[in-house]
Structures are given as C-alpha cells and as structure tokens.
Amino acid sequence: MKLRSILARVGITIAALGIFLFLRIDLAAEIKQKVEAELRLRKSPGIITSYIRDHAVRKLQIGAGGSGKPGWLNTDIEPVDGVAYLDATKRFPLPDQSFHYIFSEEMFEHITYEQGQSMLRESYRILAPGGTMRLGTPDLLRFIALFQDAKTKEMSDYMPMKLAWHKWPNTPDTECYILNMVMREWGHQFIYTPKLLRANLEAAGFVNIKQFAVSQSDHKELRNMEDRASWAIAGANAYENMFFEATRK
C-alpha cells in the first residue's frame, strides 16, 4: 500500500510537471506574439513618416491585413511587418490633405455605423483636393434580391458558390441562411445599401460619387485593386459587393 501511494504521488507530480511545462511553452509563445506586435506598433510612426517623405503621389490602404500593395501606405489595426498601425474608428495619424488616393476592401462592414461615419470624415480630411477614395463592401440589396422567386442566372450561380466557399450547409432556405451569416459572421457590424453608403459619403463632404464594377475605375491607380477579383470565387465576390469612388472637393 505504501509503495502504491508513493507511485501515485510520483505519477501526479509528473503529470502536474507536464502540464506546467506545457502551459509555460504556451505562455512563452503568447508573450513572444505580444512583444512582436508591440515592436510593429513602435515601428509604425517611422513607416508613415518615411512613406510621406518618399512619395509625391500618396496612396493609403485601410485594412490591408497581409495584402500590402506596392507603392501604397498599407495600414491595419493588427499590422504585420511593413504595415503601419491605423485604427479606422479613430483620428488617423496622418496630416490634413496629405494623400491622393484611399482604398479599402472588405473592411468597412467590420465597424459600426457611427464608426463608419467617422472613418469617412477622416478619409475626407486627409485627402488632398481632388483626391479619391475607393471603398468596397457588401451590398445588402444583393442579398435581399436573392429572396425573389424569379432569380437571374447570376443569383442562381451565386448561392451554391457562396455555400461552397465557406463550407456552409445546405438548408431548406438558402437565401435566409446566407443573409443571416453575412450579417453576423467575421465580426461584421453593419451592411450597407448603395443608397445609404452614397448618402454617408455625401454627408462627409465627398462629391462625384460613382459606383463601379469590381476592378473598374476612372483612375488607373484604382483599377484592379481588389484581391478577391483574382480568387477562384471571383464570381461570388463580384455579385455580393459594391465598389464606390468619391472625390474630395
């Protein structure tokens, strides 16, 4: 009995030690990630200063993620190496009238309505007169249109493509499932109609507001910008998103 008790205690001790070491490794990895993130934040002002100094025509991407674009100041709230920190819901760390182009794809729907209004006002502030912003975001009307009985070929092609893209299940009401997921998934906060997005751009001061098809623009600097246009699901992306451009007076 005494030997069994000793062996049991040894077993418990070894198990506890194993758990402790595992947690320490996990903790070390977490600390390493936080340190690296802090270092990237500290580098951010230098990235911004260097970009403004070195570029006569300045182009800002908001919400770049890992898709940095050559010749652009790529920014994100969680920047990777070479990307500057920018929280689109707060005042941008950029001078007034200092940029000529702004681009943002699949980011605007991730902030609240009020934060979106602030982002548009800040975008207007940092654009030089005649500067243009291009904004790509889901179009609520395209999802609502799926509920009509007489569907276009584009709608009929879109729905199974969307399910396959996200590995979503088939349900008795595909339209309802897609709409709910788009409204709630990926941290989405607010999905716009073209009417509301246009009105908010106007309220921020923008003029010459135009809606374009994916990758199309009057400005060569803003053509073929959308990453998803080259993905296998380009057709689904083209159906569900709208792309607006607006100019500062």
Image: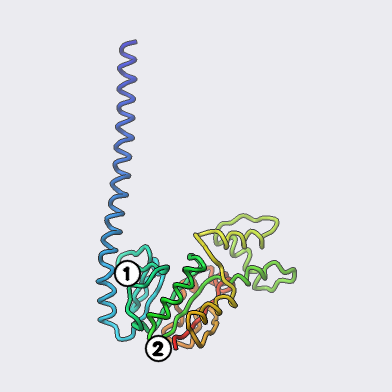
How packed mark 2 is, by other alpha carbons closer than 10 Å (few <14, some 14-19, many 20 or more), is some
Q: Is residue 53 left or right of residue 177?
A: left
> Quadrant location of the N terminus?
top left
Q: Is residue 32 left or right of residue 202?
A: left
Indicate the position of residue 96 as horizontal and vertical percent values: 34, 81
**Which color scheme does this rendered protein use?**
rainbow
Q: Which residue is mark 1?
A: 84
Q: What residue type is disc 2 on?
A: Pro
Indicate the position of residue 91 as horizontal and vertical percent values: 37, 71
Q: SS at mark 1?
A: strand
Q: Is residue 137 left or right of residue 84?
A: right
Foreground pick, 161 / 57 = 57
Residue at 25%, 76% (x, y): give it.
Answer: 50
Q: Earlier in the sequence, mark 1 or mark 2?
A: 1
CB under 8 Å between callouts 1 and 2? Answer: no
Q: Which residue is mark 2?
A: 129
